[in-house]
Image: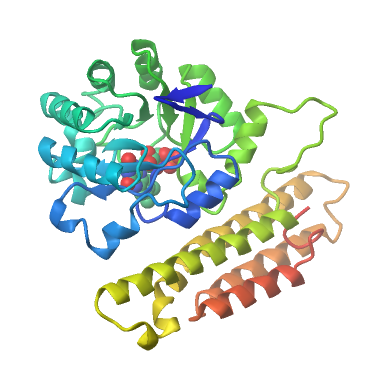
Amino acid sequence: MINIGPYQLDGEAVLAPMAGITDQPFRQVCHRMGAAMVTAEMSTSKADLRQTSKSLLRLADAADSEPRVIQIVGTDPAEMAIAARYHVDAGAQIVDINMGCPAKKVCKKLAGSALMKNPSLVADILKQVVDSVDVPVTLKIRTGWDLENRNAVQIARMAEDIGIQSLAVHGRSRACRFNGLAEYDTIAEVVAAVNIPVFANGDINSGQNAQKVLNHTAASGVMVGRAAQGRPWIFAEINQYLNPLPKNAQKTSTNRPGCFTAWQKSLILEHLELIHDYYARFETQNLLHRGAKRSTINKDQAIDLAVKISRKHVCWYFNQMVQCASNLMKEHTSDFSVATSSCLVAENQAIKTIEIAKKQFNTLLVAKDQQQFLKQFFSETNLKGDIAA
Ligand SMILES: Cc1cc2nc3c(=O)[nH]c(=O)nc-3n(C[C@H](O)[C@H](O)[C@H](O)COP(=O)(O)O)c2cc1C
């Protein structure tokens, strides 16, 4: 069991913060699929940017599962401390500090992973943030500045001494950005060096892989980012792999990882609805805030952002469906008993159908049409043959 301050996590797999992706609807879906903890998108520590619509969207909100985690990014210790207090006052139950993001926009201000180059500034930031709030403060880092300067162990020890209550370590240096494969040796060294929970992060994309990384690093848990895009059920897959049910118990969720079943389709539809509701509400509030009268707000205008956000997530779901059909095709191609059967033709056709549907979905301009389109697509898609087994 992983404890972060007073919070006991119900599992070992958590969702990685991803700006522009881990919005409130996606966090809700991932939590429902078994993510033991989800983090709101990173939020700048700059006070003058706190009231922009982008920042307001990034607040942890009451609909978030507990513990509600907010991530802050910045470079000025006093500013970071004020930002932490602001978010705690707004309901955050854990404050995470981002020293893992390699984005140029973030690093050129010596924030995010660039901070690892300056351990004394790191110490200052951590101290001031820890002292400013009475909730747990956690830290997300990379293995170091670059391959020659892997100082994650030094930063981790210092963080523990200052009072940081858990760490997430992405197995790449800042200079690696997202290139190459994540390495887990440095994460193992961090785990051995500290007594607080450590989440291993980087390229974890299956239950088997999660188990391997846990075995290699002895980390308390894993943090999953990109593999959850279009595949939030990866958390259920990891949980089932790490904690298999007794042989005679009935499995409830992902019986065949990678295949689309009815409940996955209804989850996608629910996700779409959550996006539409959340952003429509947000946009309406935003317009009211800017002085618009409720009676004059055009519903379609309020939902415009939702339609755009939906395209991104639904596109990832379509990609997963293609992946699923390709996997089935590969399985059948290597199985000589069915290689000549109609399976391959059906799967090939399924891939084309999904690709066409993806293009059509992206042309839809209204939330209602997006929902209708997906419902129809799923109802016309034969569970047994087209995209699922
Ligand atoms: C689009 C995108 C946005 C990200 N935004 C953040 C962020 O805001 N804060 C952060 O600490 N890491 C951020 N990351 C890094 C991820 O949290 C994670 O460390 C990284 O993707 C490696 O994990 P993965 O291989 O499971 O994706 C982001 C990654 C991606 C792909």
Q: Is residue 243 above or below residue 233?
A: above
Image-based side of 319 in relation to 137, left or right: right
Q: Residue at x 34, y 59 (%)?
A: 57
Display coloring: rainbow
Left or right: residue 102 compared with residue 33: left
Q: Residue at x 61, y 61 (%)?
A: 270
Residue 94 lies, with reference to residue 104, above or below; the image says above
Q: Position of residue 253 (x, y in %)?
A: 71, 43
Whether residue 8 is visible: yes
Quadrant of the image occupied by residue 55: bottom left
Residue at 19%, 27% (x, y): give it. Answer: 131
Find residue 294 and report its horizontal and vertical position in percent.
Answer: 37, 82
| Spot occupied by residue 275 in the image (x, y as percentages of width and height) | 49, 64
Residue 73 drawn above or below residue 1: below
Q: Nearer the viewer, residue 91 or 104?
A: 91
Count of labels shown? 0
Nearest the viewer among 68 and 72 is: 68
Going by the picture, which residue comes out furthest to the bottom?
296
Q: Nearer the viewer, residue 92 or 271?
A: 92
Left or right of 75 on screen, residue 311: right
Residue 360 visible: no
Q: Quadrant of ligand 1?
A: top left
Instruction: Give the left or right position of residue 386, taking residue 125 as reference.
Output: right
- In x, y percent, where is residue 260? 70, 54
Q: Quadrant of the N terminus?
A: top right
Identity of the residue drawn at 35% across and 17% down: 190
